[in-house]
Image: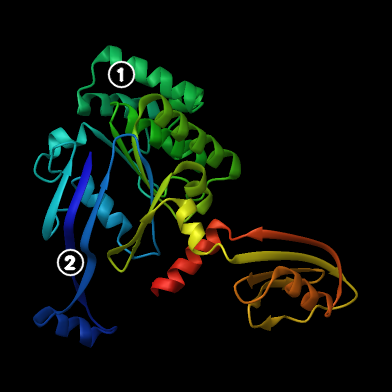
Amino acid sequence: MIELNHISKTFRIAKRNAGMKEAVKALFRKEYTEIHALQDISFSIGKGEMVGYIGPNGAGKSSTIKVMSGILTPDSGECRIDGLVPWKNRKEHVRRIGVVFGQRSQLWWDVPVIDSMELLRDIYEVEPARYCRNLDMLAQMLELGEILRTPARQLSLGQRMRCEIAASLIHSPKILFLDEPTIGLDAVSKIAVRDFIRQLNAEQKTTVILTTHDMQDIEALTQRILLIGKGRILLDGSLEQLKARNSAVRTLTVEFSGGDFVPVEGEGIHTVQLRSGHGVFAVDTRILSVSKAIEQLSAHAEITDLSVAGISAEELVVSLYEEFQI
């Protein structure tokens, strides 16, 4: 359904130093630097897949989404989505996709949300019967209710994001691009958005591409992860496969008494977090067994409680960033 082959995109950015003298000099001779946002990006995504697209800030996630949604034209490479080239068949393509940018709004700020929905209905030329059916379904699933009659500027962030998702789905797209859809949301709103996305994928087989720094979103929603760094795809696999790469790492969470706990650093163990009465330690079981690590910790203070866990999603991503030096 989605095919990217050797996509590259470079931005040319003007730069100058501070000060009036530098500003005047820049009028006659500008200095530029090139940013290689995407370098030889290739991957494919099938119908109904939910894929997490992760990487540090500036890795190229949003640029890839903009290429796939037809906003950006790449310098080289091919992209076909449902048989269409996004930047060449833009009008037909946008009828088939929905896009949510967490830090940008498609709702008109000073009018009730329902007015924005009706304008989007006209833009996408949605039949009245299908529009009413979709709006009723989205209002029920996302618990919009009276929110639809409220101006966007008077909504809380969580309410607005639910409306943004509804607006992106009012024309029944086959593909949904979500760029940081839960940024800044409280726990209740995040759970509501995740539940809705899961339900949408299960019932309508909507293909979902999710970019986020929130690994709880990734764990809750996606079966597959694409890791991008410095404009290149570094890894492609399931979360379980990626965790298996670091299966030897265990996290020890310790509650202790009897004074201050001295930070523990040694072969196979290091301190992750330490405060009064509580410590978190990472143990590489290829070097040091969990029982030996507990013995070392016991030598420093009296342990009152202890738990052992595998690597978390956040720790996994940090280790991948360190491994690929991104």
Q: Nearer the viewer, residue 244 or 297?
A: 244
Tell me residue 256's x, y (percent): 84, 69
Q: Nearer the viewer, residue 143 or 117?
A: 143
Residue where numbered disc 2 is placed: 10
Q: Nearer the viewer, mark 2 or mark 1?
A: 2
Q: Is residue 302 above or below residue 222?
A: below
**In the displayed structure image, the side of residue 149 where residue 11 appears, left or right:** left
Rendered image coloring scheme: rainbow
Residue under the image location 34 percent in, 15 percent down: 132
Quadrant assignment, res 23? bottom left
Quadrant assignment, res 113? top left
| Amino acid type at image mark 1 | Tyr
The Cα–Cα distance between marks 2 and 1, rounded to whole angstroms, is: 39 Å
Q: Is residue 121 above or below residue 53?
A: above
SS for tag 2? strand
**In the displayed structure image, the side of residue 89 where residue 169 appears, left or right:** right
Residue under the image location 44 percent in, 39 percent down: 161
Is residue 107 visible in the rendered structure shown here? no
Residue under the image location 17 percent in, 62 percent down: 8
Residue where numbered disc 1 is placed: 131
